[in-house]
Image: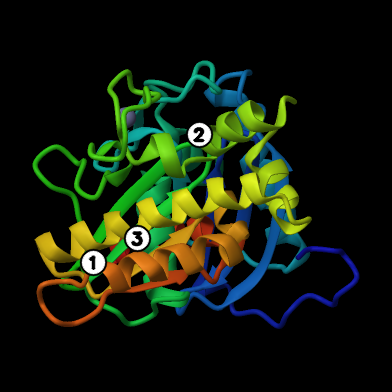
Amino acid sequence: MNDGDEAPASTGTDDVIAGIDIGGTTTNVLLCRSDLGVIDTVQIPTAAQRGGDVIVRDAVAALTRLAATHRVEPRAVGVGAAGVVDPRSGHVLVASRSFAGWSGYHVTGAITDALGVPAYLDNDVNAFLRGEVLAGAVAGEDYVLGVTLGTGVGGALWMDGALMTGAHGAAGEIGHLPGFGNCMCSCGERGHLETVASGWAIARRFTEISGRAATAKDAAAAAQDGDRGAAEILSDAGHALGHAAVLTAGLIDVTTVVIGGGVSDAWEFLEPAIGETLTAEPVVSGHPVKVVKAALGNLSVALGAAACATTSMR
Ligand SMILES: [Zn+2]
């Protein structure tokens, strides 16, 4: 982290790439080398309600300060953003409700105008998976489902050593797969994985049983304090994730599932349930699917976005 106390790393400026992760509440900015060795990072609040120009201006300012501290000039910038994005044109197509003035915004154009270097845009879940495959918990693996457990459940697929997009860019969107009960989903349909395994679902269920307004983090804290109801809610999420892993492995023969996002901090409650399901529902290939926790924490999206920039430049 950039605490300002360390002497700047010795630098050759040619090799430096920047990654920016624009989330609904925080933006992570990262500088790394083309081999994805992290130089430094900084986190700032996202002014999500103030429109694309302010969101990008804040991120560029943070990046410029970080680069000046290390006396480097990044030669490209990769951005991972929540929502539906068009990586080819660099526009946000559909933003979540936590953003204003973000749908339709030309992210890469604004960054290139500000910094004079090429910029690349990808969906944050794709960037998460790219980061974990290239430098994280599943480094070097070729067949991976990435799952992010945040407010919702995001998914992405890495197949044959590359991100798989599918016909409509929705490959791996496991959060809205049906077959997980009958509760109403955020998308208006019923029984999706997200109704059991997402932050909002865990929060809602724990609010119901505890009788107080609660978050998924509250549920995890209560489970840690021995609250059986909270532990059961997290265990249900784990069983559902295990089942989703088995379905994916059965269909497209992934070897591994990597799970990140804030809810994955409750891994000690998710993992046993995931394991139970993987044992109870063996995969047809005879090769058990591995399910692991993400290793890069809140840097995976920014690092994956930076990797996207290096890959795109080749
Ligand atoms: Zn849904």
- First of labels 3, 2 by sequence position: 2
Task: Give the number of the disc on residue 313.
Answer: none
Please name the residue shown 67% across and 44% down the image: 219
Task: Give the number of the disc on residue 281.
Answer: 1
Q: Nearer the viewer, residue 228 or 186?
A: 228
- Which x, y percent locates residue 243? 29, 56
The quadrant where residue 167 appears: top left
Query: What is the CA distance from the residue labelled 2 to the residue labelled 1?
Result: 24 Å
- Which x, y percent locates residue 116? 49, 47
Write down the residue under mark 2.
Answer: 201
- Which x, y percent locates residue 260? 49, 58
- First of labels 3, 1 by sequence position: 3
Pointer 3 with pointer 1, Cβ within 8 A = yes
Write down the residue under mark 3.
Answer: 242
Element class at badge 1: loop
Q: Is residue 215 left or right of residue 169?
A: right
For label 1, count other residues whose C-alpha is less than 10 Å away and answer few (under 14), some (14-19) or many (20+).
some
